[in-house]
Image: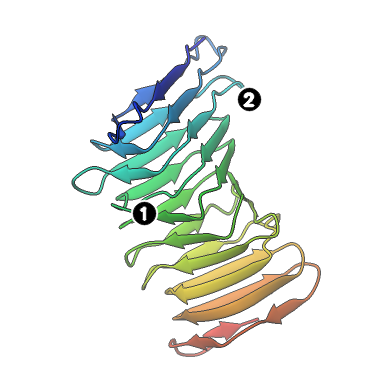
Amino acid sequence: NGGDVRVRSTGLGSPISVGSVSTSSVTSGSGSGGDITLNGATVLNTNATFLATGSANNGGDVTVNGTLNSKDTAKTLAVNTNGITVFEDVVGGNLALASLTTDAPGTTQVNGGSVTTTGVQTYNDNVVLGDDTTFKTTNAAVTFTTASSAVNAAGHEVTFETGTGAVSAQNVNNDFNQVNVTSAGAVTVIDKNAMTVGFATVTSILARTLSGDLSLGGNVSASGTGNAITL
């Protein structure tokens, strides 16, 4: 089994500076991943992977209990665990990550209100929101993988700000409350229940509910041609 890694900030104004961390332990099909816990503001000093995978559902939890930013220049982060990944605070608020990728299975909890990257954000596991949340990129896609990533907004609003980047959230178990789009390319959002599209400025948008009302709470504009708005 993998051992736990816990790092705490000194509290003297210096953030935790990390690269890749691994607590994975899978031998002959068995083994538990250890937990990775970063208690305090954290910066990535290199492109990084947090790896806590275990056999079956025995992955360790990955928890960042503070802000998470890149150091000096934008860094990539991949979080690979079949346990729970928790971002308790803002991600990329001071210096954006280059990209963020989570793997399947498992769950990612986004509690800090925003995730900002210069490149793509790809969520391959289920995503649960602990607050109104903005997913922001610089003309890059935000993707919740259709087969494995259902979004549970838990009653919170979701805002996408991706420039010309596409937004894809097509899992049939998605449960959004209200979706807003400050800017995006092609947007496709499916919800198993009722959903409100608050406002949207996009190239094209397809919004669909499988059960319940689809409501418009603000202006929706699309610059694409043909069937640019499909509800």
Mark 1 → mark 2, Cα distance in angstroms: 32 Å
Sequence-wise first label, 1 or 2: 2
Q: Quadrant of residue 178?
A: bottom right
The residue to which callout 2 is attached is: 57
Q: Which residue extends farthest front?
A: 12
Task: Examine the rendering and report whether any part of residue 52 can be seen.
Answer: no
- Depicted 123 relative to depicted 58: above or below: below
Residue 35: x %, y % from top left: 51, 21
In the image, which disc is placed on residue 93?
1
- Looking at the image, which residue is at 56% across and 15% down? 32
Q: Is residue 39 left or right of residue 75?
A: right
Residue 12: x %, y % from top left: 30, 31
Task: Examine the rendering and report whether any part of residue 98 can be seen.
Answer: yes
Q: Quadrant of residue 60?
A: top right
Residue 171: x %, y % from top left: 64, 56
Q: Amino acid at mark 2?
A: Asn
Q: Is residue 105 left or right of residue 208?
A: left
The front one of 215 and 122 is 215
Q: Which residue extends farthest left?
A: 72
Q: Amino acid at mark 1?
A: Gly
